[in-house]
Image (spheres, rainbow, N blue to C red):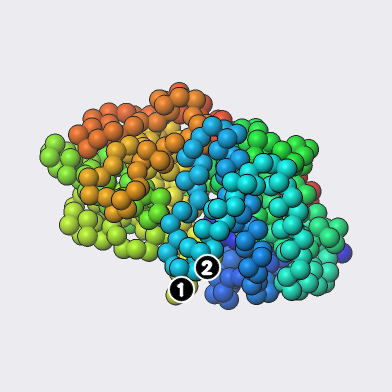
Amino acid sequence: MKNKIVLLFPDGVGVRNYLFSDVFKKANEELVLFHNFDPETITAIKQNSSISDAITIPVYKESVKEKFLRELICLSRLYNNTEKVDNKSVLAYWNWNQKTFTKKLFYKLIEQVAPFFKDYTKILKLEEKYQKTIRQNPFYDEVAAILKKIQPSVVFCSHQRALKAATIFAAAADLGITTTTVIYSWDNLPKARMALRASNYLVWSEYMKKEMDTYYPEISSESIYVTGTPQFEFYEDQKNIIEKEIFYKRYNLDPNKKIICFSGDDTKTSPDDPSYLKDIVEEIISANLQDEYQILLRRCPVDFSGRFENIVNDYKDLIKEAVPLWHFNSSKEWNAVYPSVEDVKLLVSTAFYSDIVVNVGSTMAFDFAMFNKPCVFINYDQQNKKVKDWSVDTIYQFQHFRSMPNKNAIIWLNSKDEIVEKLTLKKSCSLDMIQWKETVLEDYKKASIKIREQLKLTT
């Protein structure tokens, strides 16, 4: 009888990184997807992976007590983390501006009591209470019954933050089932949103392993494995590069012009992206460089705001758009949005054919570094801001940017006046960028192999 592995993918990025990569390909184990995707999504996922069964996660209704403890733990940890790393921007991860009266009341109470729980021994007591509380939810019993029936050897989750995963992992642990989670991204650990507790934690690098020790010292280093992340393996496969003639024709690109890729963030991270894009367009035209350069826009896949439509329509000759090839249902909720296999090729090809990428502090810096392409970080605020208290100053003070060896790792665009100079001169990554990539990503080329070894997958 084959061993079974239960797979949890709280978002579409997990589907791409772990089902479209080599992690679970040709595994002898039976792969069971435990999910909340719609039927259409499941059908598409099965067509592009070796999933043998798909079971719907029961409805989870978080109790007020669970939510209160979870949020209190988060803010208490943020206070603790702020002191640990001497970085006040850590507290900016908390949403201090709730909209509704009920939420304002709820979170105001948390904000008043959290400073009294920032001592780490008190945080651990809160964690114990939270673990007991999630086991009192009827959802726990429903999940435990399903896991008993499946009898998996491992439960694997692609994101440590997922709410439901906390209870699923608790039920699995109580049944003696090994649990393994991935730390989703390089900026996650200071945010204090580790919802679940696992037998094993998979991290990108030694740098991230040290972060685990900083922010979660109660977790044994022996349960933390440096595996790398498979999302960057796609860049090593030549088959993911679309033929030049096809790529240029599909996106109406001129083969005689250089490509500046503008990669958009989500509306919360960078609310002024359309204004920055307009600045670039205006400066290129002002310098009469529109016959030498073209802009390829890749918006954030979950940005459905339509905020770029006006600028794209106004400058169709200069701005070309490579729309992310993600599937989504009519609700467009984040957990029902996931990339197609073709989007992997689109992203890889965008990095391959572009000459430079520009954005506000995006991970895309590492994607483009795969092909030695330089990255420009926008480092000035708009005069007419969409969100009054938003600033690039806050963004670049975030803890994960301290992983940079120095400020020369990327190109800093400090004003609109610098656009032509900064976007047209640099031809390749700096040595500092290569060093930064090695620090954050480490041995990413063997990520699938290392994860398979940790999960004890057989072929």
Q: Position of residue 68 (x, y in %)?
A: 62, 61
Which residue has dot 2 on it? 336
Q: Residues within 10 Å of mark 2 (few under 14, many from 20)?
A: some
Q: Position of residue 35 (x, y in %)?
A: 64, 68
Tell me: 275 left or right of 360: left
Which residue has dot 1 on it? 331
Q: Residue at x 59, y 52 (%)?
A: 113
Q: Residue at x 45, y 24 (%)?
A: 406
Q: Position of residue 30 (x, y in %)?
A: 76, 63
Secondary structure at badge 2 equals: helix
**Badge 1 amino acid:** Ser
Q: Are marks 1 and 2 in contact (CB under 8 Å)?
A: yes
Q: Nearest the camera: 448 or 273?
A: 273
Quadrant assignment for the N terminus:
bottom right
Using the rendered image of the protein, determine whether residue 48 is visible from the camera's viewpoint: yes
Q: How far apart are the two marked residues, 1 and 2, measured between alpha carbons? A: 8 Å
Dividing the picture into quadrants, the one containing residue 54 is: bottom right
